[in-house]
Image (cartoon, rainbow, N blue to C red):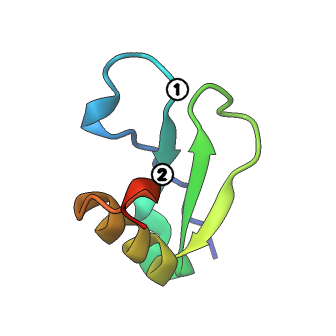
């Protein structure tokens, strides 16, 4: 059985070349996690975030939730 390789992507808002993260959402359905890594260190470690936690994170970002609103 072959293991699916992560396909790393950056946000389209990351065009400034600064500090970015990359995610491999192609693994969400099969592995139930979304790997996240530092784009400046592609050979470094990746943090595997559960799909439900990543969905909550995205909802918060899209909704404008942050430390100032608490």
Query: Going 47% across and 19% down the picture, which residue do you hit?
Result: 18
Give percent across and percent down for residue 50: 56, 78
Residue 38 falls in image quadrant:
top right
Q: Outermost residue toward the top?
A: 17
Q: Residues within 10 Å of mark 1 (few under 14, many from 20)?
A: few
Q: CA distance from mark 1 to mark 2?
A: 14 Å
Tell me: residue 24, above or below residue 2. above
- Residue placed under numbered mark 2 in the picture: 23
Residue 63 falls in image quadrant:
bottom left
Give percent across and percent down for residue 57: 42, 67
Between residue 37 and residue 3, name the one nearer to us: 37
Query: Going 27% across and 33% down the picture, which residue do you hit?
Result: 13
In this rendering, position of residue 1 left or right of residue 19: right
In this rendering, position of residue 60 left or right of residue 40: left
SS category of the residue bearing label 2: strand
Q: How many marks?
A: 2
In what quadrant of the picture does the N terminus appear?
A: bottom right
In this rendering, position of residue 9 left or right of residue 63: right
Q: Residues within 10 Å of mark 2 (few under 14, many from 20)?
A: many
Query: Going 39% across and 39% down the picture, which residue do you hit?
Result: 10
Q: Could you tell me if the residues under marks 1 and 2 are in contact, i.e. CB atoms within 8 Å?
A: no
Instruction: Please name which of the two marks, 1 or 2, marks the residue nearer to the observer.
Output: 1
- Residue placed under numbered mark 1 in the picture: 19
In this rendering, position of residue 40 left or right of residue 44: left
Please give the label number shown on residue 61.
Answer: none
């Amino acid at each position: 059985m072959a293991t699916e390789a992560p396909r790393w992507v950056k946000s389209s808002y990351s065009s400034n070349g600064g500090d970015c993260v990359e995610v491999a959402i192609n693994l969400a359905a099969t592995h139930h996690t979304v790997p996240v890594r530092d784009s400046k260190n592609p050979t470094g470690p990746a943090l595997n975030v559960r799909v439900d936690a990543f969905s909550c994170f995205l909802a918060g970002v899209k909704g404008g939730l942050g430390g100032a609103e608490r």
